[in-house]
Amino acid sequence: MARGSPDFQQWTSVQRYAGTGGKTIFCDTATISANIVVPDARWKQIELARGFVTKIRIRFPPGSHGLLWVAIWDDDKQIFPGNSGQYFHGDNEVIEFDTEYDVPEYGTEYRFWLKLLNYDETYEHAVIVSFETVLLP
């Protein structure tokens, strides 16, 4: 059947797994002490459920002045941002983007890691990260 015919539909992975109950949001806050720079980065484990991530939101509350840096890792490789060694940072800002990334399984756990740096020499800062995830059966 030709493209554009009435029976043609584009199927996304979200539609393929619509019968699983839709999306679940996993959210966590990571706080990092002052003056944590390379190579002393802090790591925070984010526990998820079996499925795949469709959207990621990173919220930098006011006051970090771009000095709090965050990257998302899948065990031993950086996945977001896509350039190795790069980080998300901001002040009173939300960074959000769509993706289709399978939640990695390690034994019986499903998780990502946040790699955190804080170039502020005086204050600790926090970042709020949420993952919209389509759960798999």
Image (cartoon, rainbow, N blue to C red):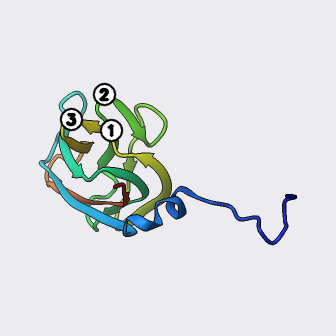
Question: Residue 67: percent from the left, percent from the top?
Answer: 29, 50
Question: Looking at the picture, does residue 9 appear above or below residue 32?
Answer: below
Residue plotted at (28% across, 68% down) = 62
Question: Residue 35: percent from the left, percent from the top?
Answer: 16, 42
Q: Which mark is residue 92?
A: none
Q: Which mark is residue 76?
A: 2
Question: Looking at the picture, does residue 43 appear above or below residue 22?
Answer: above
Q: Answer yes or no: do the residues labelled 2 and 3 have beta carbons within 8 Å?
A: no
Of residue 27 and residue 91, the one placed in the foreground of this image is 27
How crowded pointer 3 is (Cα within 10 Å; few <14, some 14-19, many 20+) is rated as some
**Of callouts 3 and 1, the N-terminal one:** 3
Q: Secondary structure at mark 3?
A: loop
Of residue 3 and residue 37, the one placed in the foreground of this image is 3
How crowded pointer 2 is (Cα within 10 Å; few <14, some 14-19, many 20+) is rated as few
Q: Secondary structure at mark 1?
A: strand
Which residue is the site of mark 1?
73
Q: Nearer the viewer, mark 2 or mark 3?
A: 2
In what quadrant of the picture does the N terminus appear? bottom right
Q: Amino acid at mark 3?
A: Ala
Q: Secondary structure at mark 2?
A: loop
Q: Amino acid at mark 2?
A: Asp
Residue plotted at (40% across, 54% down) = 53
106 to the left or right of 136: left
Residue plotted at (49% across, 51% down) = 100
Q: Amino acid at mark 1?
A: Trp
Q: Residue 130 falls in which quadrant of the image?
A: bottom left
How crowded pointer 1 is (Cα within 10 Å; few <14, some 14-19, many 20+) is rated as some
Question: Residue 8: percent from the left, percent from the top?
Answer: 76, 64
Which residue is the site of mark 3?
41
Of residue 126 and residue 18, the one placed in the foreground of this image is 18
Question: Residue 119: percent from the left, percent from the top?
Answer: 25, 44
